[in-house]
Amino acid sequence: MKLKENLKALMEANGITLTELSKRTNVPKQTIHNWLCGTEPKSLNQIRAIATFFKLSIEELCYGDEKKKTQKKHEPNPIEEHEDEIRAGVFEVVLRRIKK
């Protein structure tokens, strides 16, 4: 994962400090600091907030150009394709007891 390098480069290129980024994205300063030190993120929503702030996809933020090279053009990302439905709660979960 290249989040550490990508995030540092984006912050420098945009002239934004850690404190500023935290305030504008509502991601705690300590969390961003941990990412900059190499800790892997635990919250997809926090990563999404940072990616949205920089107008990038989550893949671009976390993996840089490598992910784009490996992803085929004709394959849509299933999560992004159905993100509106997922967020709107248009899904059904069925729980069944399985006999042993």
Image: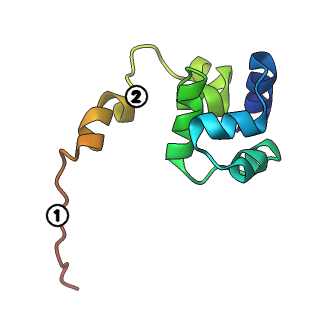
Q: Nearer the viewer, residue 26 or 74?
A: 26
In the picture, the quarter occupied by the N terminus is: top right
Dot 1: what SS? loop
- What is the C-alpha distance between the residues marked 2 and 1? 25 Å
Q: Which label's residue is closer to the chain start, 2 or 1?
A: 2
Q: How many numbered marks have been drawn onto this rendered protein structure?
A: 2
Compared to 2, does 93 lie above or below? below
Residue 88, how many percent across, how many down? 23, 42
Q: Mark yes or no: residue 54 visible.
A: yes
Pointer 2: residues within 10 angstroms few (<14), some, or many (20+)? few
Q: Mark yes or no: residue 2 visible.
A: no
Disc number for residue 55: none
Residue 46, how many percent across, how many down? 56, 44
Compared to 94, does 19 lie above or below? above
Which residue is pictured at 16% across the width and 73% down the height?
96
Quarter of the image holding residue 95? bottom left
Name the outermost residue toward the top.
73
Q: Nearer the viewer, residue 28 or 92?
A: 28
Q: Nearer the viewer, residue 72 or 82?
A: 82
Quarter of the image holding residue 75? top left
Residue placed under numbered mark 1 in the picture: 94
Compared to 31, does 97 lie above or below? below
Q: Nearer the viewer, residue 91 or 54?
A: 54
Kindly identify the amino acid type of the residue bearing the numbered disc 1.
Val
In the picture, the quarter occupied by the C terminus is: bottom left
Pointer 1: residues within 10 angstroms few (<14), some, or many (20+)? few
Residue placed under numbered mark 2 in the picture: 77
> Pointers 2 and 1 in contact (CB under 8 A)?
no
Which residue is pictured at 78% across the width and 47% down the height?
33
Dot 2: what SS? loop
Kindly identify the amino acid type of the residue bearing the numbered disc 2.
Asn
Quarter of the image holding residue 49? top right
